[in-house]
Image: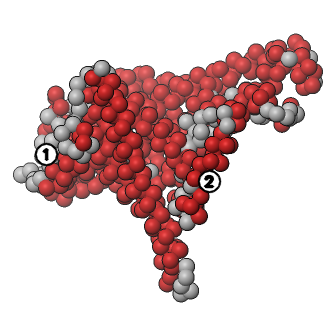
């Protein structure tokens, strides 16, 4: 009973903080990207136009700078309350109603703590390390903004044709900050933690990158917005289900429940509907011009190829999450910190604002890797309900009512419905993945260092290579033998 009450409190806390976080980000983006340029548009001078364009260009940076500190405070509280529920105890519940302001109080406390530089430490490197660790969290997330906002005009400037490579390049920098901080601290425990982090990053970045390259191969693009757009139309089109290998099934179901019947040619997406129709419908096979024996053989082989493709991408998703947890030093891969062995690892000697920056970056990195997973595997801001099922459930009518309710806000451009709906689905997906990471922390024990290295080099890297090869052949078979 008590745990049920705590779960309800966690849900209420989450919704409250979401309103605070994304309300603040939304207002900041509106003021910088819309309101100020609208005010300046009444002036005809070049200076006014330049200022308006500069404000619009700075909107992505402003949104990230507003979002990161508030979101980190929420995620710390979310994790602490979540772990308390998993272990059937009470979480922070003293500061503010039900502990809502506990992490805000912790942040203020850290800001006013004394900043100590150990004797014998390299002061410059010691100070630079937290910045090097934190900065990529800001810049690496930029290309994702265009994807998670449904390619909103204010965020188109940060979209890159090779966006995923930029994200991967930025995500490889924080380990330099950890090694730098461990070496500059003049502490043996910090140095061991930094070296462990370097070894761990080298080991687990390979399967992480290969899993994302596999998705890029399926999509035929490195642009995160393009990858997200290809997954539009519901859960059957998402990359986690074989890069849209079931789009034909989605189309066949849409055909079954549609008011008007399109032609088979209109249904042909990735060819899977042809497999479905040919395997279960003789008239459909005749319409496709296929002989019965030929059709059964092609249908069986194609179904096998699609199953292999889906299984391989599901494994790639698991490889990504495993590599991501190792990259950001989450349990069970938190060997660079390992309190039972290294006091606090690479950040043992840090205090005050520098420690706060390390702490802030850790939770921001967790949010970033969860966002990457949501965009690359779960369709980004796409609604999981297929369009045909949404129509049956009254989706257009609901959307129309919402648009009517938001009409005054839409008129002043405070709300853009497509961006709003996409943002809601992104929030649900990303924080669902964050919750899964918290569950892992509350469930699994820490690896030993030898187990961690063996698991990376002897298990994950060979498996990621096998998955990549399987996806290459299965994808080609589906495209060539079945037809796009």
**Location of residue 454 by image quarter:** top left
Element assignment for label 2: helix
Residue nearer the viewer, 467 or 396: 396
Residue 363: horizontal and vertical position, in percent? 32, 43
Q: CA distance from mark 1 to mark 2?
A: 56 Å
Task: Using the rendered image of the protein, determine whether residue 418 is visible from the camera's viewpoint.
Answer: no
**Location of residue 196 by image quarter:** top left
Task: Using the rendered image of the protein, determine whether residue 259 is visible from the camera's viewpoint.
Answer: yes
183 vs 7, left or right, is left
**Location of residue 440 by image quarter:** top left
Residue 206: horizontal and vertical position, in percent? 45, 35
Numbered badge on residue 404: 2
Residue at left 45%, top 67%?
31
Quarter placement of the C terminus: top right
Residue at left 29%, top 23%?
3
Quarter placement of the N terminus: top left
Numbered badge on residue 349: 1
Give the residue furthest to the bottom: 45
Residue at left 50%, top 53%?
145
Residue nearer the viewer, 160 or 371: 371
Numbered badge on residue 106: none
Mark 1 surroundings: few (<14), some (14-19) or many (≥20) residues within 10 A: many
Give the residue furthest to the left: 119
- The tag earlier along the polypeptide, 1 or 2, is 1
Residue nearer the viewer, 140 or 421: 421
Residue 4: horizontal and vertical position, in percent? 33, 24
Residue 217: horizontal and vertical position, in percent? 62, 38
Residue nearer the viewer, 215 or 25: 25
Mark 2 surroundings: few (<14), some (14-19) or many (≥20) residues within 10 A: few
């Amino acid at each position: 009973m008590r745990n049920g009450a705590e779960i309800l409190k966690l849900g209420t806390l989450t919704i409250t903080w979401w309103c605070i976080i994304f309300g603040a980000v939304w207002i900041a983006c509106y003021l910088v990207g819309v309101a100020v340029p609208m005010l300046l548009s009444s002036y005809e001078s070049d200076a006014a136009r330049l200022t308006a364009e500069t404000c619009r260009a700075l909107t992505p940076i402003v949104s990230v700078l507003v979002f990161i500190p508030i979101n980190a405070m929420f995620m710390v509280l979310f994790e602490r309350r979540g772990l308390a529920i998993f272990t059937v105890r009470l979480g922070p519940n003293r500061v503010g109603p039900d502990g809502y302001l506990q992490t805000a109080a912790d942040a203020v406390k850290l800001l006013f703590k004394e900043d100590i530089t150990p004797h014998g430490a390299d002061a410059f490197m010691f100070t630079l390390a937290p910045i090097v660790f934190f900065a990529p969290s800001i810049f690496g997330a930029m290309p994702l903004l265009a994807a998670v906002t449904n390619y909103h005009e204010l965020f188109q400037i940060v979209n890159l044709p090779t966006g995923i490579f930029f994200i991967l390049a930025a995500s490889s920098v924080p380990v330099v900050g950890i090694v730098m901080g461990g070496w500059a601290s003049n502490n043996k425990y910090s140095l061991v933690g930094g070296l462990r982090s370097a070894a761990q990053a080298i080991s687990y970045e390979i399967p992480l990158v290969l899993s994302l390259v596999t998705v890029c191969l399926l999509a035929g693009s490195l642009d995160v917005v393009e990858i997200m757009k290809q997954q539009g139309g519901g859960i059957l089109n998402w990359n986690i289900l074989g890069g849209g290998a079931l789009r034909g099934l989605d189309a066949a179901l849409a055909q079954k429940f549609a008011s008007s019947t399109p032609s088979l040619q209109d249904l042909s997406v990735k060819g899977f509907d042809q497999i479905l129709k040919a395997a279960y419908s003789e008239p459909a096979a005749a319409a496709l011009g296929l002989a019965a024996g030929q059709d059964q053989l092609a249908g069986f082989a194609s179904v096998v190829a699609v199953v292999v493709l889906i299984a391989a991408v599901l494994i790639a998703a698991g490889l990504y999450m495993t590599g991501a947890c190792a990259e950001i030093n989450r349990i069970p891969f938190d060997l660079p910190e390992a309190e039972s062995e290294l006091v606090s690892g690479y950040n043992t000697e840090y205090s005050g604002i520098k420690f706060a920056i390390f702490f802030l970056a850790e939770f921001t990195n967790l949010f970033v890797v969860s966002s990457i997973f949501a965009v690359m595997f779960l369709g980004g801001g796409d609604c999981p309900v297929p369009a045909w099922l949404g129509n049956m459930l009254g989706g257009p009518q609901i959307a129309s009512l919402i648009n009517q309710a938001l009409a005054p806000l839409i008129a002043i451009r405070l709300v853009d419905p497509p961006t709003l709906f996409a943002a809601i689905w992104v929030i649900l997906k990303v924080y669902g993945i964050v919750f899964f990471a918290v569950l892992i922390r509350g469930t699994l024990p820490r690896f030993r260092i030898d187990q961690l290295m063996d698991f990376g080099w002897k298990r994950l890297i060979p498996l990621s290579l096998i998955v990549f090869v399987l996806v290459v052949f299965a994808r080609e078979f589906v495209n060539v033998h079945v037809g796009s």
